[in-house]
Amino acid sequence: MTGSDRFGRLFPILEAVPAEHRLPGLVEQSTWLCDGALKDWDGPVQRVLSPVCVPSPGGPKQAVIGSYPLMGAEQALAALAAACAAWDHGRGPWPTMSVSRRLEHVEDFAARMALRRDEVVRLIMWEIGKSLPDARKEFDRTVAYIHDTVAAMKELDRVSSRFEVREGVIGQIRRSPLGVALCMGPFNYPLNETFTTLIPALVMGNPVIFKPPKLGVLLHSPLLAAFRDAFPPGVVNTVYGDGATIVSPLMASGRIDVLAFIGTSRVADILRKQHPKPHRLRCVLGLEAKNAAIVLPDADLDEAVSECVAGALSFNGQRCTALKLIFVHRSLVAEFNRRLVAAVDALRPGLPWDPGAQVTPLPEAGKPQYLSELVADARARGAQVLNPEGGAVHGTYFHPAVLYPADAGMRIFHEEQFGPVVPVTPYDDVEEPVRAIMESPYGQQASLFGRDPAAVGRLIDLLVNQVCRVNVNAQCQRGPDTFPFTGRKDSAEGTLSVSDALRVFSIRTLAATRATGDNKELVSRIVREGHSSFLNTDWLF
Ligand code: G3H
């Protein structure tokens, strides 16, 4: 299917972009942060193409918006050396700094970051095609996450500022940093998901190397000076380029202590195996998902349809939490589909800054072609595209396609589309979708739509042992960020939430002694005279 006239007019000439959303020129990111300095880069670069196209005689062509360094192993190892020096076997200034001082650095960074909101938001739109309201939401949510992490760290410190006495042993138990953390976020939340690991890693006292996602590098460039100025040398370092070239030597060095990675399980497994002593490596991984919705016979259809549309198509379905398969009871599937198609038809295609744009161009190379293949495979096996313009392609734009009936013989039933294709599968017995979820290699979340307490209650009990969040009459989602975010099977390792992330990037350590008179006196003097920052009872307000 090719684009209709409607989509043919989607991409403007650059001069037609409203002035406040235009980039000031090419964004050539020619520095990288290492050991407290922004180092100049004059080596090879990666050209950055926007999902936003410009008209050309041969059809829409992706706009070139800048470039970033394609670093080599030498630079990656320099960043590692800087991070290792900041760690210094746990004796460096950052891991040994008092929590209150560390938090001052983090709050200083948050204040500097807040000043760059407009630039970062503009680059999010141009680099990954996220709509203006969603790009702003991503930025604001990230700043809020930093403040919430600071508050959670204070709370954690308060509960650790006491002694426990058990069986004649006095102990003080705290959480200590692990070492050098390598943080890698995904392209769909390039700022937020990178920072939801990077910030707690820093707060706990771990120096960090961070590699922005391949699509979503430039949007970090306005923040590099803030990182340099807010943190001591070596505490935050950046690397850019091809993963195999720069990440492999980092992992093979054996000096990465924590790997925070959001991406595919295939890459996560490769990275873990590159570590010479994988048992030393703490991993926190956000991986694939194929979240399903089950619409029960008594569901409120208006609610189910509007949640399924938001769940399947927010940011064009490019969310790990997106609804990627919708099971609907056969008794109401015809009406569900009618309303679903009407709701999808009403979505507004547009460029990220267009007021009210709900579907935008896709940033990944070859993505419209991949989605077209999924649609063609489903059609060849008996599914129809229910919405008239579904699957239309124009340059990087792919118009959402509702596929019905989707079944287990089709690729769309198993593959994570991560894009605007909405497969609907009818069922007669609820055991059918439950079995599909059980047999899926993924286990992140599920959504249930229904009103009968007995049926919904029974399904909640069945599904909580398959996935890690069951959403009732609501789409799947990560937020609120204080809730645990994780998955089973191939979907995740470790749990992230504001407070859980602090645990992920730390380990419990304690100082303990027998409660003899001499030892009590010793401990009292250490505390009273302020000889230790670990063994103390100071309160952080
Ligand atoms: O891509 C996965 C994101 O963590 C999902 O977050 O549910 O808030 O969109 P969200």
Image: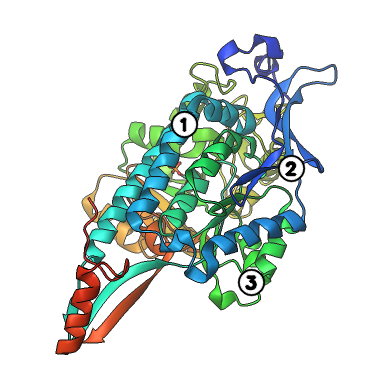
Q: Is residue 411 left or right of residue 508?
A: right
Q: Which mark is residue 254?
A: 3
**Mark 1: which amino acid?**
Leu
Real-space CA distance between mark 1 and mark 2, rounded to the nearest whole angstrom? 44 Å
Q: What crowding class fits label 2: few (fewer than 14 Cα within 10 Å), some (14-19), or many (20 or more)?
A: many
Place residue 21 in its image quadrant.
Answer: top right
Question: Mark 2 or mark 3, which has the lower sequence index?
Answer: 2
| Towards the viewer: 372 or 531 | 531
- Asked if one can make out residue 532 in the rendered structure from this viewpoint, the answer is yes
What amino acid type should be assigned to the residue bearing mark 2?
Pro
Question: Which residue corresponds to the image point at 32% horizontal and 41% vertical from the top-left?
Answer: 299
Gap in angstroms between the C-alphas marked 2 and 3: 25 Å
Kindly identify the amino acid type of the residue bearing the numbered disc 3: Gly
Q: Residues within 10 Å of mark 1 (few under 14, many from 20)?
A: many
The tag on residue 69 is 2
Q: Is residue 250 left or right of residue 508?
A: right
Percent across and percent down for residue 242 are 74, 51
Query: Residue 339 location in percent, x, y?
Result: 44, 28
Which residue is the site of mark 1?
340
The color scheme shown is rainbow
